[in-house]
Protein backbone atom coordinates (compact mmCIF):
# COMPACT_ATOMS: atom_id res chain seq x y z
CA UNK A 1 0.00 0.00 0.00
CA UNK A 2 1.54 3.24 -1.18
CA UNK A 3 0.47 6.57 0.26
CA UNK A 4 1.28 9.83 -1.50
CA UNK A 5 0.35 13.26 -0.24
CA UNK A 6 -2.93 13.27 -2.15
CA UNK A 7 -3.70 9.65 -3.11
CA UNK A 8 -3.51 6.18 -1.62
CA UNK A 9 -2.91 2.97 -3.58
CA UNK A 10 -4.01 -0.44 -2.26
CA UNK A 11 -4.45 -3.97 -3.61
CA UNK A 12 -7.41 -6.28 -3.15
CA UNK A 13 -7.77 -9.91 -4.19
CA UNK A 14 -10.57 -12.46 -4.36
CA UNK A 15 -10.62 -15.84 -6.14
CA UNK A 16 -8.45 -15.13 -9.20
CA UNK A 17 -9.22 -11.41 -9.39
CA UNK A 18 -6.71 -8.70 -8.53
CA UNK A 19 -7.75 -5.06 -8.07
CA UNK A 20 -5.38 -2.10 -7.83
CA UNK A 21 -7.33 0.72 -6.18
CA UNK A 22 -6.36 4.41 -6.06
CA UNK A 23 -8.25 6.51 -3.52
CA UNK A 24 -8.04 10.30 -3.42
CA UNK A 25 -10.18 13.03 -1.87
CA UNK A 26 -13.01 14.06 -4.15
CA UNK A 27 -16.73 13.94 -4.83
CA UNK A 28 -17.33 10.17 -4.72
CA UNK A 29 -16.96 9.11 -8.35
CA UNK A 30 -16.03 5.46 -8.90
CA UNK A 31 -14.18 4.46 -12.08
CA UNK A 32 -13.30 0.83 -12.77
CA UNK A 33 -11.18 0.00 -15.85
CA UNK A 34 -11.96 3.48 -17.27
CA UNK A 35 -15.72 2.88 -17.02
CA UNK A 36 -18.26 4.10 -14.49
CA UNK A 37 -19.43 1.84 -11.67
CA UNK A 38 -22.88 1.44 -13.29
CA UNK A 39 -21.37 0.45 -16.64
CA UNK A 40 -18.88 -2.04 -15.21
CA UNK A 41 -21.15 -3.70 -12.63
CA UNK A 42 -24.67 -3.79 -14.11
CA UNK A 43 -26.03 -5.81 -11.16
CA UNK A 44 -27.14 -3.71 -8.18
CA UNK A 45 -25.89 -6.19 -5.56
CA UNK A 46 -22.33 -5.97 -6.90
CA UNK A 47 -22.45 -2.16 -6.83
CA UNK A 48 -23.60 -2.16 -3.21
CA UNK A 49 -20.82 -4.63 -2.33
CA UNK A 50 -18.19 -2.36 -3.90
CA UNK A 51 -19.48 0.71 -2.03
CA UNK A 52 -20.03 -1.08 1.30
CA UNK A 53 -16.72 0.08 2.90
CA UNK A 54 -17.83 3.69 2.44
CA UNK A 55 -21.26 2.96 3.93
CA UNK A 56 -19.70 1.09 6.88
CA UNK A 57 -17.30 3.94 7.69
CA UNK A 58 -19.75 6.75 6.80
CA UNK A 59 -17.34 8.26 4.27
CA UNK A 60 -19.65 8.15 1.23
CA UNK A 61 -18.93 10.93 -1.27
CA UNK A 62 -15.60 11.94 0.29
CA UNK A 63 -13.22 9.97 -1.94
CA UNK A 64 -12.84 9.31 -5.65
CA UNK A 65 -12.03 5.70 -6.57
CA UNK A 66 -10.05 4.60 -9.62
CA UNK A 67 -9.52 0.85 -9.93
CA UNK A 68 -7.92 -1.52 -12.41
CA UNK A 69 -9.22 -5.09 -12.13
CA UNK A 70 -7.84 -8.23 -13.80
CA UNK A 71 -8.92 -11.85 -13.84
CA UNK A 72 -11.91 -13.79 -12.59
CA UNK A 73 -15.58 -12.98 -13.02
CA UNK A 74 -17.72 -10.09 -11.89
CA UNK A 75 -18.33 -11.41 -8.36
CA UNK A 76 -14.65 -11.96 -7.70
CA UNK A 77 -13.79 -8.57 -9.15
CA UNK A 78 -16.36 -6.82 -6.96
CA UNK A 79 -14.92 -8.53 -3.88
CA UNK A 80 -11.39 -7.56 -4.88
CA UNK A 81 -12.35 -3.90 -5.35
CA UNK A 82 -14.15 -3.93 -1.98
CA UNK A 83 -11.05 -5.23 -0.19
CA UNK A 84 -8.84 -2.72 -1.99
CA UNK A 85 -11.09 0.19 -0.97
CA UNK A 86 -11.17 -1.03 2.64
CA UNK A 87 -7.37 -1.32 2.78
CA UNK A 88 -6.94 2.14 1.26
CA UNK A 89 -9.36 3.66 3.79
CA UNK A 90 -7.37 2.12 6.64
CA UNK A 91 -4.17 3.50 5.11
CA UNK A 92 -5.72 6.98 5.10
CA UNK A 93 -7.25 6.74 8.58
CA UNK A 94 -6.29 3.83 10.85
CA UNK A 95 -9.18 4.60 13.23
CA UNK A 96 -11.59 3.16 10.64
CA UNK A 97 -10.12 -0.35 10.93
CA UNK A 98 -12.39 -1.58 13.79
CA UNK A 99 -15.52 -0.51 11.87
CA UNK A 100 -14.34 -2.28 8.73
CA UNK A 101 -13.32 -5.34 10.73
CA UNK A 102 -16.86 -5.51 12.21
CA UNK A 103 -18.28 -5.49 8.69
CA UNK A 104 -15.86 -8.31 7.75
CA UNK A 105 -14.24 -6.19 5.05
CA UNK A 106 -10.59 -6.46 6.10
CA UNK A 107 -10.34 -10.23 5.67
CA UNK A 108 -9.24 -11.66 2.34
CA UNK A 109 -11.64 -14.42 1.31
CA UNK A 110 -9.37 -17.50 1.04
CA UNK A 111 -11.80 -19.69 -0.91
CA UNK A 112 -10.45 -20.82 -4.25
CA UNK A 113 -11.71 -23.21 -6.93
CA UNK A 114 -10.79 -26.79 -6.12
CA UNK A 115 -8.75 -28.50 -8.81
CA UNK A 116 -10.10 -31.31 -10.97
CA UNK A 117 -8.75 -34.73 -10.01
CA UNK A 118 -7.79 -37.46 -12.46
CA UNK A 119 -10.24 -40.35 -12.76
CA UNK A 120 -13.14 -38.01 -11.95
CA UNK A 121 -15.44 -35.78 -13.98
CA UNK A 122 -14.82 -32.65 -11.88
CA UNK A 123 -13.25 -31.81 -8.53
CA UNK A 124 -15.65 -33.97 -6.53
CA UNK A 125 -18.07 -35.44 -9.08
CA UNK A 126 -17.18 -38.96 -10.13
CA UNK A 127 -18.01 -41.07 -13.14
CA UNK A 128 -21.13 -43.23 -12.78
CA UNK A 129 -20.42 -46.42 -10.83
CA UNK A 130 -21.64 -49.70 -12.34
CA UNK A 131 -21.70 -52.79 -10.17
CA UNK A 132 -22.22 -55.13 -13.16
Image: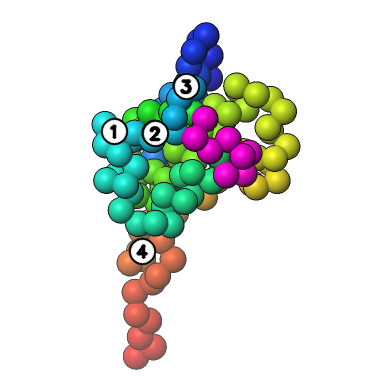
> Picture coordinates of residue 128 (x, y %)?
34, 80
Horizontally, is 63 left or right of 127 in the view?
Answer: right
Q: Quadrant of residue 17?
A: top left
Q: CA distance from mark 4 to mark 1?
A: 33 Å
Q: Is residue 106 above or below residue 23?
A: below
Does the residue at mark 2 contact the one at mark 3 (Cβ under 8 Å)?
A: no
Does the residue at mark 4 contact the one at mark 1 (Cβ under 8 Å)?
A: no
Give the label, 2 or 4, closer to the camera: 2
- Residue at x 44% of width, y 30% of height: 27
Residue 45 visible, this angle: yes
The residue that disc 3 covers is 24
Q: CA distance from mark 2 to mark 4?
A: 42 Å
The residue that disc 1 covers is 33
Horizontally, is 39 left or right of 21 in the view?
Answer: left
> Picture coordinates of residue 90 (x, y %)?
62, 27
Local secondary structure at mark 4: loop
Considering the whole magenta stretch, tell me its main secondary structure: loop
Q: Is residue 34 above or below residue 104?
A: above
Q: Earlier in the sequence, mark 4 or mark 1?
A: 1
Q: CA distance from mark 2 to mark 3?
A: 10 Å
Q: Quadrant of residue 114?
A: bottom left
Amino acid sequence: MISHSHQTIATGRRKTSVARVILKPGSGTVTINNRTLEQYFPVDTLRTEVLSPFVQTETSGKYDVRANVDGGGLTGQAGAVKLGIARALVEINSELKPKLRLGDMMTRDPRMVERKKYGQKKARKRFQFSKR
